[in-house]
Image: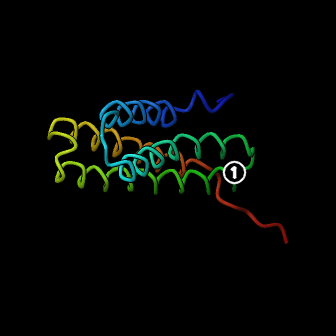
Amino acid sequence: MRKFEDIIAWQKAQELTILIYTLLKHNRDFSFRDQVQRACVSIMNNIAEGFERQTDKELKKFLYISKGSCGEVRSMSFLALRLGYIDRENFNQIQLLAIEISKILSGFIKSIRPQTFDF
């Protein structure tokens, strides 16, 4: 990979972010909307920031943060469904995409060389 835009998890996170922004565009619960939008943006931005730091240790750290934000989006989608902000079909779409991103991130994290120490 030469740039963060090549990372599949980043591409999928952008897709998820656009979906969330579109679904909640007219939602008047501003604090809810802003929180879930920030969580989505956090997924993609932490992937980008970690990649740009150009160290395995930093990349791994930021990928874990992205993974946490995936969980936050999934959690908030349950609330959005219960509050009637989204329907079941959109809920399922969000869940599938967030889970897919999380799995991709897990694989990416595992592929990064473990930290080695020189003594």
Q: Position of residue 100 (x, y in %)?
A: 36, 41
Locate residue 89: give its quadrant: top left
**Image quadrant where one finds the C terminus:** bottom right
Rendered residue at 24%/55% (across/down): 79
For disc 1, the neighbor class at 10 Å (few under 14, some 14 to 19, many from 20) is: some
Q: How many marks?
A: 1
Quick check: 63 left or right of 102?
right
Locate residue 51: give its quadrant: top right
Quick check: 31 left or right of 42?
left
Q: Nearer the viewer, residue 72 or 118?
A: 72
Q: Nearer the viewer, residue 117 or 45?
A: 45
Q: Residue furthest bottom?
A: 119
Rendered residue at 64%/30% (across/down): 1
Rendered residue at 38%/55% (across/down): 71
Snapshot colouring: rainbow
Q: Which residue is mark 1?
A: 56
Quick check: 85 left or right of 37?
left
Q: Name the element at disc 1.
A: helix
Quick check: 92 left or right of 51?
left
Q: Position of residue 6 (x, y in %)?
A: 58, 27
Q: Position of residue 65 (x, y in %)?
A: 54, 56
Where 118 sits versus 56, above or below? below
Q: What's under tag 1, amino acid-wise?
A: Asp
Rendered residue at 23%/53% (across/down): 78
Q: Position of residue 34 (x, y in %)?
A: 43, 47
Q: Residue furthest right?
A: 119
